Image: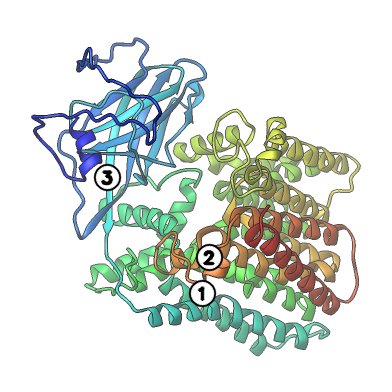
Amino acid sequence: MQREAFLATGASIQTISKMELYVEDPPNSPQSFTFTLTKLSFEGYTLETLSGNQYRAVYFDLKNIPQENSSWSLQDISLAVTVQASPGSIFSIYLFNGVGIYGTSTASLISYNPLTASAQYTFDPNVQLTVFPELLPVFNESIAFVASKGTLQDISMNSVIFTFLPATTPSFSQQSLGLYYVYFIFFLFLLPIGVAILVFREFLSRKLVSKTGVVVVLVVGVLCRIALAVTTAHVFDMNVLLSSTRGWFQFRNPQGGPGPTLPLTYFLYWVSYSPYALLQLAGFQDAHLLGHAAGMVESVFVKLFPIIIDILMYFLLFRFRPDGVGFVWATFYYLNPLAIFTSSVWGQYDAATMAFIAGGVYFMSRQRYARAALAFVVSGMVELVGFLPYIVLLLRVGRARLYKTLATIALAVVPVFVYPPETDLLVRVFLSSAGFLHGQFSQAGSYTLLGSFPQLSIITQFRPLLISQVMIFALASVDTYRKRMNAEMLVFYLCLSAAALLLFTSLLASWVWLVALCLIYAGMKGKSDLGAFMLVFGTAVTFVEVSNTTGSAYLILGNLGYPIVPFIEAIRNRLEIFTVMVTALTALVLFYLKYGSSDPRQTIIRTSAITLSLYLLLYFWLGVYPS
């Protein structure tokens, strides 16, 4: 009753001495009515002590948990638990903090599986509930596990870790907001695209590239990334990275954060963050901008790992083809808005997967199979997709009957088993991808065509991701058996596999995969059309990601639902426009992957016109005048 009073009045009520029941007849009712209350009772259900029976909900009393204040806000709660439940059970985790009941998008509708009974769940209290499906706990601060399907039998909680981050409120004028937006657009789109086009015009037909040109592009890319890293952040993921890095350097907490990010990835973030930790020990005082939880200098070091990876990828692409064309394709990745956005605004590590794969392909093309295998394995330890080229490499070496080499590259997988949490999460991600566990990879999300249009949801029942990956692997195996598999064919199949993953899962930050893989393939096969289209592709995907998913205000200020440019960011059916756009662009990528060898200058003009026309069509058809 106290909670109902709080929801009705907004004030915390401790004692309730009177209750009124109000019943109203609809206006202009032709009949009179009477209301008689025959019984009013308050049910006094009690909570049972867990003893191995079947339960719909299990509660843990937290007694006195640390509380938020004006300076610190609760970022997440890390729970190490072991769950026993009936087969097929699905449960969610909730937090009770006084009269507030919080749910989360990171620990909801979890499918119970005996193979993953012990797990580390990260609870982000980002959904406040008005209705709770079970009994309210008798304690003000509690964590509840509630089964929406099946029953819970036993839950053992091994540890609970609360992570708080600084909470600040930005203060600025509308004019300042406009300046920040222009700053954001300039360093994300105008400057890098302008320099990339100049490089395209000047170096495409050259045989030799001067060191000055390479250095100028390098400096421009670093400038754009640092300028954006300081002033922007994807709040949710940035706070996850902050919780991980600060948790390790301040409290020696080895738990990185929520899956499917693997432990090795967090470790690489820690390595690049370590110089900033030394600065803090030396007494450095950072400044904060726009209410971001991270300081201005700290923001750069948090994102330093993906920024370094972008630089590495720039030189790797140039290494595949050290001439004018290779330099242009390297520039089209390094100054691509999608690469800059993913690493320096979002701070995501998806490019690292492709960088290690690129290194493995480079070594494979030069028959250095042991180094290639190690690079592929490290890529897989960052994201599971890296193991696909490793398996193909094993098959290729085995088919060539190079048994000594096969034994050597088989040992490259040993690092996977060195750190048990890494092995455990890799198994979970694989089971989710194969559809055996409910999770991010088991179904099409809202950022896919199948997930955003309910009419197409029936297709997801046939597991299109699993079927497509099996078909691609089968074709790759056939080519391996016929001894036609080489480094170029491997990249081709990786492009197909990445396209399927992106179209059938909500891997929003992973669209940079296609840019990297297609530019590698363009350099190796001389696919000028494909390479030229990657600049258009990356620009278009970045634009719709910013305007149709999070919005620029979220990236600049951390505010959702506040469109800085309303006629672009506040239109209807934004996700539908995004999914149709990226699906159509991916179809164009697959076309150029297989066909096309015309003038790349004409390709840029032609595909730019097609992309702009498609966006305008969707803008008016789905956004402005939906049926």
The circle drawn on residue 491 is none
Question: Residue 353 at x, y = what percent?
Answer: 60, 55
What's the residue at 42%, 70% (across, down)? 300
Residue nearer the viewer, 546 or 212: 546
Near mark 1 (Cα within 10 A), the count class, few <14, some 14-19 or many ≥20, is: many
- In the rendered structure, which amino acid carries the disc numbered 3? Phe
Residue at 31 percent of width and 52 percent of height:
247
Q: CA distance from mark 3 to mark 1?
A: 32 Å
Are circles 2 and 1 on residues that touch, CB within 8 Å?
A: yes
Residue type of the residue flagged with mark 1: Arg
Is residue 37 left or right of 58 when viewed as pictured?
left
Residue 413: x and y in percent read 60, 42
Q: Earlier in the sequence, mark 2 or mark 1?
A: 1
Taking the image as shown, residue 593 lies to the left or right of residue 625, namely right
Give the residue furthest to the front. Answer: 30
Element under disc 2: helix
Residue marked by disc 3: 162
Q: Which mark, by number, is residue 343?
A: 2
Mark identifier at residue 225 = 1
Report if residue 164 is visible in the image: yes
